[in-house]
Image (cartoon, coloured by chain):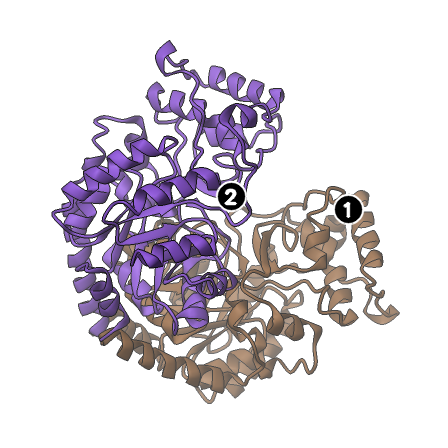
Chain colours: A purple, B brown
């Protein structure tokens, strides 16, 4: 049995295609299509909302397995209440954000929705609450997007029969994960969206496979959005692929005519930038007037995690409601150049699978 | 016949593995091993030296084909004599270089070798002289490492029956190359050594194949140093691979116990940085005390091509003779993490070919 087959059998999935997404609708559709939908939990500041989303998953994957992705940074960010932490954001930074939004024509929020706190899910306190909630649902995987999860979290997952995955940007990260008990390593290359390292997938994936591939399956992440890329990942030694960005233009987001999907559909692979302005750690984002503003000489240095996202949390909400595709805050990988239409998840998955077979046939010739 | 076979037949090579190198000894060995050795011409300030090197190639490839790589940037750099151009280098920049070399303990050159001019090969005047010389030898390829070669150069090559290759960092570059008459496009990803763009190979290669693959063969460059990576390049749609960095630790360089090969052998894939300090254009280099010095707050902005390399030309020579592996100036890709021993070219090629077959067998399973 190949590594891919063993992985599929262990998780009860048809295809070794892991789909990370912040939307429970998209995640459920990925699982229904035979992959493993992995719901990103970081946005659930209130764990009760995560509970609701996971109840939706329980009922909408047609009985198929799904996973969750929590965020526990290796270096623990400053803890505190929303109010305490908020006091640590310098006034000059707030002024820059306000001035920039005004210049870019982003309208303020209406009274009811004002005062967004930013994302708190990367505080260990919040992430642990996510783990507690998730283990009450029928999850098949807990992934950690930043560093190794704490050993006690891995042990709790294992006690519940749930394997743990962790993202790695270097072979050294991967070794540390596996030493800590992680069951699946996701080798995430430079070209990926969101938090990402410096080493590109072509180099990183075989390096991680050489480092830990005899102990755990390795998934390739970063730059995957076609059957050729899935096949290339397998050629590099990966047992499967982890795709995040590519689902952002699926219909199940139910965004309608959104500025974000408009911006994603028209962007090329040159239209991303790796920057600390989203969370305080380097993350790949869609390049536009907002990211450009932070590259100007008058822009302040981004704050450390979790303060930077608290600083820009309301701004993100304003831009999202503002509806200008030139001014959105959106993590996405270089594969955005291949995301050129809004399609249902099932159609995306069917195309991928057909392309893998085409590429395989071409490679044999 | 597959694209790879057609390419090999057209060029008269056994394997679609193109080996770029500044050493005629390495280039000849690559051709003898069944690939296409491509000699980088940019370092030949005096075209007569190139003539000598190509005569060596004519006699030392065992009758097998070889190519040359010239550099003609799309945006033509300031032309002028060495002395005229040298006058354009600001004094503050010279002082920074001198101060840095002193701080890093790099000894001055002995009188005879002092006054290196830096590389002049990216001046169009010098590059055209390279073309003239090359066309007098039995070359099978002219490649251009920066932008499309001028149309008249392409026409002269074609008139001599020599196909032309050009490196592309985006699909738009690739389209322009082919519109100008280029016969082979080298899609070079972010992870590559030397001059490189932002888009990683995993994303770039299929994008370039989609853009021009029905008109010309596409080679994958950047991050290739194992059979798995060669196979991945083919899975992405490439007809062959272009490797540069990987030959830098071959025995045919005849460097003996050199600081540069010591530095390369011990470096990991995290030990490179993309910077303008080598030539004025972004190029990936080995990360060390020299690149770090240019990232400090007191460092000046790098100068435009060709002035930056004139500024640091003598410094490069001093570092090379200085013998400290922590202080060398060396373009290399992220694949340096896989370059862990000094081996003859024939052995490197044999390993690659064996690994390709292993990877192919694993992928079939």
Q: Which residue is mark 1?
A: B93
Assign the N terminus of chain A to one quadrant of the image. bottom left
The image position of residue B69, as x and y in percent, is 51, 66
Q: In this rendering, is residue A180 above or below A325?
A: below
Q: In this rendering, is residue B235 above or below A102?
A: below
The image position of residue A206, as x and y in percent, is 41, 68
Assign the C terminus of chain A to one quadrant of the image. bottom left
Q: Is residue A196 left or right of residue A77?
A: left
Q: Is residue A223 left or right of residue B73?
A: left
Query: Which secondary structure, mark 2?
Result: loop
Q: Evaluate whether residue B222 shows in this view.
A: no
Q: How many marks?
A: 2
Q: In this rendering, is residue B287 above or below B261?
A: above
Query: The disc numbered 1 marks a residue on which chain?
Result: B
**Residues marked 2 and 1 touching at CB (< 8 Å):** no
Seen at 30% across and 47% down, the residue is A135
Q: Which residue is mark 2?
A: A282
Among the 4 quarters of the image, the one containing residue B165 = bottom left
Q: In this rendering, is residue A320 above or below A61?
A: above
């Amino acid at each position: 049995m190949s590594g891919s087959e063993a992985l599929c059998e262990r998780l009860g999935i048809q295809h070794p295609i892991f789909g990370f997404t912040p939307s429970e609708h998209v995640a459920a559709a990925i699982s229904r299509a035979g992959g493993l939908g992995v719901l990103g939990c970081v946005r659930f500041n209130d764990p009760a909302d995560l509970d609701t989303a996971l109840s939706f998953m329980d009922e909408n994957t047609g009985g198929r397995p799904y996973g969750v992705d929590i965020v526990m940074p290796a270096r623990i960010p400053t803890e505190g209440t929303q109010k305490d932490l908020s006091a640590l954001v310098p006034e000059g930074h707030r002024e820059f954000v306000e001035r920039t939004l005004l210049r870019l024509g982003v309208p303020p929020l209406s009274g009811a929705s004002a005062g967004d706190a930013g994302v708190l899910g990367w505080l260990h306190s919040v992430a642990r609450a996510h783990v507690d909630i998730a283990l009450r649902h029928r999850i098949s995987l807990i992934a950690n997007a930043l560093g190794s999860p704490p050993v006690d979290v891995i042990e709790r997952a294992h006690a519940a029969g749930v394997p743990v995955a962790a993202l790695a940007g270097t072979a050294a990260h991967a070794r540390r994960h596996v030493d800590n008990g992680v069951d699946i390593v996701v080798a995430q290359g430079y070209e990926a969206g969101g938090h990402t390292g410096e080493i590109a997938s072509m180099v990183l994936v075989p390096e991680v496979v050489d480092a830990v591939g005899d102990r755990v399956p390795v998934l390739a992440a970063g730059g995957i959005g076609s059957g050729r890329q899935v096949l290339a990942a397998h050629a590099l030694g990966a047992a499967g692929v982890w795709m995040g960005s590519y689902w952002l233009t699926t219909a199940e987001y139910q965004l309608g005519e959104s500025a974000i999907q408009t911006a994603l559909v028209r962007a090329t692979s040159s239209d991303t930038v790796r920057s600390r302005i989203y969370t305080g750690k380097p993350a790949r984002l869609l390049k536009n007037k907002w990211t450009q503003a932070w590259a100007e000489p008058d822009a302040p240095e981004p704050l450390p995690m979790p303060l930077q996202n608290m600083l820009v949390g309301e701004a993100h909400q304003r831009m999202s409601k503002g509806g200008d595709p030139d001014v959105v805050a959106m993590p996405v990988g270089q594969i955005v150049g291949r995301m050129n239409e809004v399609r249902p998840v099932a159609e995306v998955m069917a195309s991928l699978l057909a392309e893998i077979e085409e590429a395989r046939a071409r490679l044999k010739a």
